[in-house]
Amino acid sequence: MSSAKAPLVLLHGFGGVGAAWEPVLRRLDPDLPLILYDLPGHGRSLDAEGVGHAGIMAKAVLGDLDRRGISSFHLCGHSMGGAITSLIALKASGRTRSLTLLAPGGFGPEINHEALRLYASAVEIDELARALAAMFALGSMPDPAGLDRLAEVRRLSGATDRLMEILRSFLVESDGRIGQGILPLTSFESSGVPTRLFWGTEDPILPVTQAKSLWAGAEVTLIEGAGHMLIDEAPDQVASAIASALQMG
């Protein structure tokens, strides 16, 4: 890549699309080098290589960055996208300038899988509104424009089947309970990647107690009163965090 600036790679959460970052992008430098994905099995990437759990998607995204000839990058991921960016940072620590995580998956076994199942199966705007409301803090609601974007891609043939396939790939059953797989968290401390984590104190999908799982040297910020959807609920704080991370190189 000819630009001296390392690009920012943004990865959305389960069931989302790259355009979900729009509230944050409005608050960032418009000249920022940016790579925005619809993750495999999502949006316009329904049949892309790499549909599966976070490890499979991390391999697919890193492979695409390799094909683009991008030698270094900043990473930011939300929820499932946070698990994926974490694994990319672990696999390519020497190329990762910074890692910003928003309520990432894989930091503890607890997960509200029932809410995710409802969300994965929702197609029409009213269904999506109800499913997403369960991911926000009480009293917050999804943006109507975002609902329109999601409904458009959910109506694509096979969209909800793909999401259910992906959901099954990262859920595990232990002692009769359904939870999520856990990242190899002990491996991250030695990676040397500057890491910041943000978590809403009212997260109904991934409990905020999982923020305690972060390794030494990483910074944790709890966002009071926010739920799981930090891109929508706290875009100013997310944009400010990203802008600070980008100053690292």
Image (cartoon, rainbow, N blue to C red):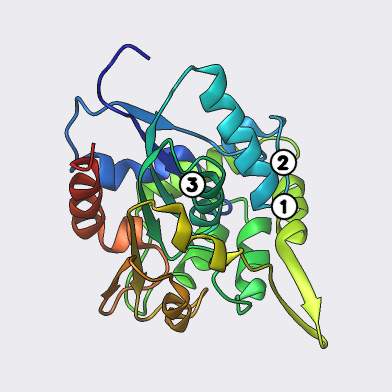
Closer to the camera in the image, 220 or 164: 220
Q: Which residue is mark 2?
A: 51
User: Label 3 neighbourhood size at 10 Å, few (<14), some (14-19), many (20+)?
Assistant: many
Q: Where the C terminus falls, by quadrant?
A: top left
Secondary structure of the residue carrying tag 3 is: helix
Task: Give the vertical position of 216 relative to 121 (above or below).
Answer: below
Q: Amino acid at mark 2?
A: Val
Count of numbered circles on the image: 3
Reading the chain from its start, which is encountered first: label 1 or label 2? 2
Residue at the image position 47 percent from the left and 44 percent from the top = 93
Reading the chain from its start, which is encountered first: label 3 or label 2? 2
State whether residue 101 appears in this view: yes
Q: Which residue is mark 1?
A: 166
Question: CA–CA distance between discs 1 and 3?
Answer: 21 Å
Quadrant of residue 7 within the rendered picture: top left
Question: CA–CA distance between discs 1 and 2?
Answer: 7 Å
Secondary structure of the residue carrying tag 1 is: helix
Cβ atoms under marks 1 and 2 closer than 8 Å: yes
Q: Residue 113: image x %, image y %?
A: 66, 72
Mark 1 vs mark 3: in front:
3
Q: Amino acid at mark 3?
A: Ala
Task: Give the vertical position of 123 relative to 105 (above or below).
Answer: above
Residue extending farthest front = 190
Secondary structure of the residue carrying tag 2 is: loop
Residue extending farthest top = 2
